[in-house]
Image (cartoon, rainbow, N blue to C red):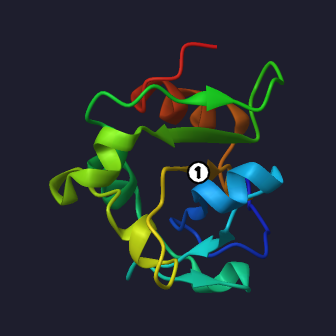
Amino acid sequence: MTVIRSAETWGTFRLTAEAVTVESCEAGDAAERGWLTRWGDLADEYFESCWDLRDVVDMFGRGYRPEGDGDRVPRWLTFEASSDDLLMPADGWAFLSELICGEEAIGGSICVHQPGWMTEASWVRFCRLLGWRG
């Protein structure tokens, strides 16, 4: 029997997000970024971002095309939001505009990070479930 020891809570996925406005785009940066909580807030600490498998699949299993980080086995998957997604609250991306006080997001992304408790083989299967083709 293999015992996996990790600082990660078993079954928990960590997500990060960033929102881009016209002004931040002109400056070449994101307006806001951080660990994404289940309530749609950004936090500074990774442990505040606790998502389970069903939440992640429900959020991204609807036709978004993820990009890996460039490694053969990605350490994270990035999902980009188009301006159409940002305007449609049903798509789950409208909260990016709410993260920026008084400004409307014109773009953004959410990244799902490989948890420390998940084996590489299981992570690859999960990435494929989310639409990653490598």
Residue hosting label 1: 112
User: Total number of numbered labels?
Assistant: 1
Residue at 52% in and 77% down: 100
Picture quadrant of residue 9: bottom right
* Circle 1: residue type: Val
Q: Nearer the viewer, residue 24 or 56?
A: 24
Residue 101: x %, y % from top left: 50, 85
Picture quadrant of residue 60: top left
**In the image, farthest residue toward the left:** 90
Q: Nearer the viewer, residue 13 or 96?
A: 96
* Circle 1 residues within 10 Å: few <14, some 14–19, many ≥20: many
Q: Examine the rendered structure and indicate whether residue 106 appears above or below residue 131.
A: below
Residue 14: x %, y % from top left: 60, 65
Residue at 31% in and 44% down: 85
Q: Is residue 59 left or right of residue 9?
A: left
Residue 75: x %, y % from top left: 76, 41
Q: Is residue 44 left or right of residue 11?
A: right
What element does badge 1 sit on?
strand
